[in-house]
Amino acid sequence: MLRVTIDGTRHVVAGQPSILDAAGSVGVEIPTVCHDPRLAPTGACRVCLVHVDGSDRPVAACTTPATDGMVVVTETPELRRLRADLLRMLAREDAGPPAGSTPVDSAFDLLLHRHGVASDERSRHPRSVDVSHPYIAVDMDRCILCFRCVRICADVQGQFTWRVWGRGAATRILPDSGTTLAESSCVSCGACVDTCPTTALQDRTVRATGPATAWTRTVCPYCGVGCELEVGTRDERIVAARPVLDAPVNKGHLCVKGRYAHAFVHATDRVTSPMIRSRGHWEPVSWGEAIDHVASELRRILDRHGPASVGVLGSARATNEDNYVVQKFARVVLGTNNVDSCARVCHAPSAAALGTMLGTGASTNSFDDIEAARTILVFGANVTENHPVVGARIAQAAMRGAGLVVVDPRAIDLVDHADVYLRVRPGTNVALLNALAAVVLDEGLEDVEYLARHVDGLDELRATVAGSTPEAVAPICGVDPDDIRRAARLYATAKPAMSFHGLGITEHRHGTDMVRCLVNLALLTGNIGKPGTGVNPLRGQNNVQGAAHMGCEPHRLTGFVPLDEGRDRCERVWGSPVPSAPGLDAVQMVDAAARGDLHALWVVGWDVLLTNPDTNRTRPALADLDLVVVQDLFLTETARDVGTVFIPACSTYERDGTFMNAERRVQRVRAVIDPVGDSRPDWDALRLAAGAMGHAADFPYASAADIWEEIRRVWPVGAGIGYERLDREHGLQWPCPHDDHPGTTILHADGFARPGGRARLASVPYRPPADAPSEPYPLVLVTGRNLYAFNAGTMTGRTANVTLRPTDTLEISVDDADRLGVVDGAAVRVTSRSGSIELVAEVTDRVRPGELFATFNDARRRVNRVTGPHGDEHTRTPEYKVTAVRVDAVRTSPTGA
Ligand code: SF4
């Protein structure tokens, strides 16, 4: 603690702050132009000059540390005059607000106004605004050369798009293209806009609609990083979003999706009234008619075919409260455990492997461990595109000197920062991971003491990997043996080491085994239960962790506990029995529909038809159902093709509740605007249906808060997480069993929730993927996401992100393209054993010969027509990452059909 006197008042401040931060912490604002709390202070603008007792001249408050007993004066006539002179010099660079905007348009304008700098002291530059970028307007005639955009692009995003060009009076800031922003390497995170004090860089929406009049703190509706943002509204419309500086996850940063992709909320094709399909046509109906129809159909189907004939799918885009009500509706109202979520098609293998080996099926550590790790292993995760804010943190850590190992068939962006890049063949992760374990054991790099105290199964693992030398597995996984050794040594010796993994490891025939082998590495080297360590699945959608955790799982209840373990507690709180018959997961529901055993499906916020593999099999199976209720924002492909009732949901921005991010953090979601049209939160539609089916008393909720209070009663591990605490503490990580518990940032610090408190190594031999390439289908297709499109494209497809990436493409190597006569940008036909699609070719060296990559976000392409029926042996998660295909050049341009 430091005692500091500021403007005559004594204060006690914590830590070792600068004078600027010390003053800020006690509510004294010192003016500054070049400072941004996300950046290291430079003192370049000198506007924050203050007097310090004992100093013969003013000092820059941002770069001068506060010291015990220091006496600071922040305002004197001399300081005001000095600041005004400095601001006047800067203003000569700035052409001022454009005609038609307010004279005090930016933070810089406000400073000039307060210091009496007149508008005629501004620059007289001619105006030319670059509006080539769909989200960012560039008006460099307002640039005062504070370099904040250059620094934040490099120091926070790690992108280096903004560059300083020229010297002296000719100094200018331009994108790396030297021309327009659209032609540059910009990844559209908006950090430069956020930091620019003058509006030289400005959101185009603000220029078009005027600034927001109200801001609401909530959580991003996209990926599982869980960034907090403030959403700006004007006249009940969303006009802007900005990052929250004190958000624990994103610390004042966002990606293009969180920052800009919100226009879908007001899209003209948003469906905001319930509809029933009648003789092939959708008819708008009242909520009462829709709910009565659904209730009577469900009753009829239950009477005739029993509870096993209906299924419900929860949503990774919906809140914890919504998903809790989904699974309770299935169990209490329908009497079935046929309930699942899209965790099935992504990270179910992570939950299974982590659960069986460590005792808890969730991420072991926190994103803050990135800065504590000396080595980071990124396995099968294109982090900079799919979890961009975490990707930026990893890139920054690598640039600061942390070791980085990247394992991926594609040369993803993080490869540029990697110490070792292992370009593994799709489907051979177990072979590679066993070789890494073999090197650790052969070279005596294992943590002998940790293994003896905490881990079982070492002898079996040693025997299993004995033959997996780097030389033995290199022909299988295609990785240089020396690189395997370098990666193993780095991970095992430059400790602490942590791993992040994505769907490149889970969406395989042997996905659970692959995660097990990754856990083996962490246990062998003692990289678990400590800061900067652990095994950390990167969850794809914002609440995929929460959807499964709330009980949208056929074999698990709220808290991810097995049915038998949680049954008594749920029955006590619900006052209703939990069905005993085993339930079907999402994949099994489609199988049951194909057999004629499933008759009704209620789908909440999941475009099953577009995202499930093997569309040509899924579609007819679902088309035969008597009742398909689709609850969503738009008429999704599922609704269009097989839906019989449409229930209008409201978006994340229109509802209250909580999300659970990839690091087990529960955060508050707050309604930014009222529900659009006649839409309602998902839980409310289910509550109405429960009431219509005679269960009103079981669903007595008037708000999301009511539901959360019930969740705390059935989930002892989260009982300490209340809305008030979440508002105050900005998120809590479970376990958090009581009100005084601080939450848990690192799991397994004191052992494992397994028999004897010991973890268990897994002995897993390598087996090849299910859909191996062969003569008619000689190439391997991997599918995945990209920066601008999110999952089924339901939301991002209705924003200007489609300008930045208009459609799905097929990445193909130069060799394969030459051999097949494929030209960059031309149409190609991709054919597998399951189906055929047409895509635009992108000839690139990101993929190697024999391998292809395609995104699956464009409903017109339907990439999942070609992915096959195979899935993980343990969880049935589809094998999206290995499909044997052939590629043929086509003469006509793609039609989008
Ligand atoms: Fe949203 Fe994920 Fe981007 Fe953060 S990183 S802004 S959570 S999409």
Image (spheres, helix red, strand yellow):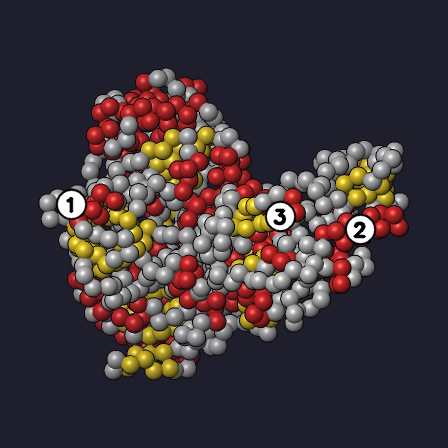
Secondary-structure class at tag 1: loop
What residue is drawn where x is 33% and y is 20%? 441
**x and y percentages locating residue 722 in the rendered image:** 58, 54
Badge 2 crowding class, 10 Å Cα cut-off, few under 14, some 14 to 19, many 20 or more, is some
Camera-side mark, 3 or 1: 3
N-terminal-most mark, 3 or 1: 3
Q: Which numbered mark, 2 or 1, is in the foreground of this view?
A: 2
Residue type beneath disc 1: Pro
Q: Which mark is residue 526?
A: none
Local secondary structure at mark 3: helix
Side (left or right) of 28 relative to 620: right
How far apart in space, not on screen, are marks 3 and 1 (Cα)?
A: 56 Å
Q: Which quadrant would the N terminus be assigned to in this image? A: top right
Residue under numbered circle 1: 778
Residue hosting label 3: 170
Q: Position of residue 470 (x, y in %)?
A: 27, 24
* Residue at the image position 20 percent from the left and 69 percent from the top: 624
Query: Does residue 376 appear anywhere in the picture?
Result: yes
> How many C-alpha atoms fall within 10 Å of the one at disc 1: few (<14), some, or many (≥20)?
some
Task: Locate residue 229, reporting x and y percent.
Answer: 56, 56
Q: Is residue 475 left or right of residue 664?
A: left
Task: Indicate whether 272 appears above or below 493.
Answer: below
Marks 2 and 1, the one that precedes in the sequence: 2
Mark 2 falls on what kind of element? Answer: helix
Residue 587 in sight: no
- Residue visible at 15% across and 45% down? 778
Amino acid type of the residue that numbered disc 2 sits on in the rendered structure: Asp
The residue to which callout 2 is attached is 85
